[in-house]
Image (cartoon, rainbow, N blue to C red):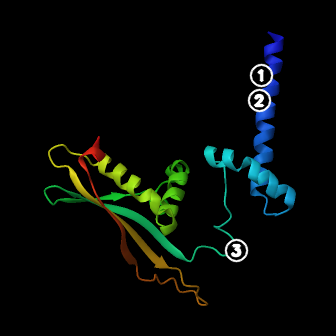
Amino acid sequence: MVKVAVIRRIAISAFLLFHILAITCWSVPLSTPLIAAMRNVIRPYLVWSGLFQSWDTFAPSPKSINSYVDAIVIYKDGRTETWKFPRMEQLSLTERYSEERYRKFVENLKEDTNAGLWPDVARHIARAHNDASNPPQTVMLIRHWSDIVPRTDAAHESERWHIQIFYEYNVKPEDLT
């Protein structure tokens, strides 16, 4: 019984120590050869577990646009419905905590470099809106963005919003199962 408790304590300590070192190595803003080598070793695990953190929010330059993504679902009878992805400014503090990784996914989804994700996202949205008597026919993914203009005065004027349909998917019957 004592042996099991000792083994359990060692395993928990090793688990915690590994994660503290891995997250520290990943997050420290240094680029030494040792840290680069360690990042290459731990990258697959941190990405898989969702524990990675990128510094692109802060440096080298912060984001210069406000943006979000939504989708329009067009049904067989012509009716439309809007699918809203989570937007941090519209969520409570507790909702923000649980939706953060999803927000990051959507932030990356709108980039053309991630176009390979678009068909799967459109199929997911179609399945979420499936109605056997009026199935979805088309899903359109839409980018919305507004430039953040640095100001020298205290003005807080919003820039106009731009809208672009960046992907249109024609839903197949097999997508809905």
x, y percent for residue 101: 55, 52
**Residue at position x 49%, y 50% in the image:** 95
The amino acid type, in three-letter code, at marker 1 is: Arg
Q: Secondary structure at mark 2?
A: helix
**Residue that mark 1 sits on:** 8
Q: Which is more N-terminal, label 3 or label 2? A: 2
Pick the residue in front: 50 or 85: 50
The span from disc 3 to disc 1 (Cα, nearest Å) is 43 Å
The span from disc 2 to disc 3 (Cα, nearest Å) is 37 Å
**Residue that mark 3 sits on:** 60
Q: Residues within 10 Å of mark 2 (few under 14, many from 20)?
A: few
Q: Residues within 10 Å of mark 3 (few under 14, many from 20)?
A: few
Q: Is residue 51 visible?
A: yes
Q: Which is more N-terminal, label 1 or label 3? A: 1
x, y percent for residue 86: 44, 56
The image quarter in which residue 104 lies = bottom right
Instruction: Return the mark for residue 12.
Output: 2
**Residue at position x 17%, y 59% in the image:** 79
x, y percent for residue 64: 56, 77
**Residue at position x 30%, y 47% in the image:** 175
x, y percent for residue 80: 21, 60
